[in-house]
Image (tube, rainbow, N blue to C red):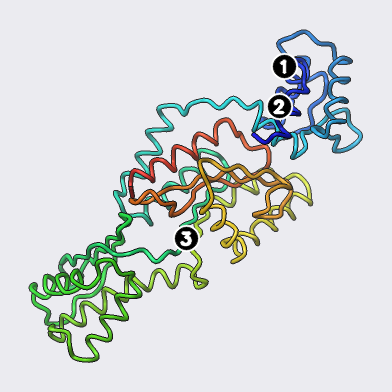
Amino acid sequence: MSNSHISIVNELNDRSRDVFRELVEAFVSNGEPVGSRTLSRRLQMPLSPATIRNVMSDLEDMGLLYAPHKSAGRLPTDAGLRMFVDGLLEIGDLSSEDRESIEAHCITHGTNLDEALGEATSLLSGLAQCAGLVFAPKTARPLKHVEFVNLGDGRVLAVLVTDEGFVENRIINMPPGAPPSALVQAGNYLNTRLAGRTIDEARRAIASEISQRRAQIDEITGKLIDAGLAAWAGDRQSANASGIGTLIVKGQARLLDEISATQDLERVRGLFQALETEELLVKLLDVTDSAEGVQIFIGAENTLFDQAGCSLVVAPFKGESQTIVGAIGVIGPTRLNYARIIPMVDYTARVIDKIIG
């Protein structure tokens, strides 16, 4: 918690804290302005609507609440939500059902990172009822091992494993006339040259070796090697032409579920546009590299999207060497159920850590 938020929390007496906490929780529940009569019914301590109105007025003077229109209801400001999350939020544990669901969706796909991240993002979107997001920076990961597996019917499974534990599977066509021994020869050839190199470095070195006729392989094995390298490298290039990283967003339609005003539609439209920009990837890369644990960006303070009314909860995940290799989280309106979503995002990132660590 920042020092400013500690100061604000300390300034609040027990009554003000209870009123503010109940107001935020009511806002998270229905998204509507909260009035004194609603709070008098929710509060455990007996307070009259008049007393509650006085407390709300004080909270408004402190910049924690505002009146969206002339109604008696109040809403938390972005600063108020930040103070609530940092100083008053009680984060519980995930239910065993949620834990089992997250593990089942992620671990089912073994160490195939693409599938595990896609499943995890879809699951988070469903559990949190907002959009799920995962970012994997395009890094020059050193390679560890490759293998070619004959699937029959002229198809070969090309398996690539990096030093970070990432596994990428690609199906390629078996060169006509290739004997089963060509798969072993191609695998052995690549494993003696790939270790410690990135896929791009390996492609350049092998292409140079073959062009100079220094490669002790036959033409068919050479075609198999070239097809495998092209398949592994091709997905990286098509995933993000900018070369910065890959951004997967699932459940964007959930952001449209509760739009009630034209400005809300414009806000969501602007968010959709931001999700498609290279600038967002650069900002996410910065957040990912410096993140420790769950990061929470609320409303106008959210420099990632420059969108008031939107929040992001994101946590980094690490590779085999315990270096940060990506981040996963959710995007939604500022009235996210932070108490439920924060541990959910944190646990999902930890599960991904286990898969690739």
The secondary element bearing badge 3 is classed as strand
Q: Which residue type does callout 1 highlight? A: Arg
- Are there few (<14), some (14-19), or many (20+) residues within 10 Å of tag 1? some
61 left or right of 250 in image: right
Determine which of the numbered discs, if any, sits on residue 26 in the image.
2
Query: The N terminus appears in which quarter of the rendering?
Result: top right
Question: What x and y, as percent, mark residue 95?
Answer: 45, 27
Question: Which residue is denoted by mark 3 in the rendering?
Answer: 137
Question: What x and y, as percent, mark residue 242?
Answer: 52, 71
Q: Which residue lies at the image location 75% right of the left edge and 44% below the top edge?
A: 260
Instruction: Specify the quadrant of the image occupied by residue 336.
Output: top right
- Are there few (<14), some (14-19), or many (20+) residues within 10 Å of tag 2? many
- For marks 1 and 3, give the one nearer the viewer: 3
The secondary element bearing badge 2 is classed as helix
Front residue of this view, candidates 87 and 125:
87
Q: Which residue type does callout 3 highlight? A: Pro
* Cα distance between the residues tagged 3 and 2: 38 Å
Determine which of the numbered discs, if any, sits on residue 42 in the image.
1
The secondary element bearing badge 1 is classed as helix
Question: What x and y, as percent, mark residue 278?
Answer: 59, 66
Classify 195 as above or below 41: below
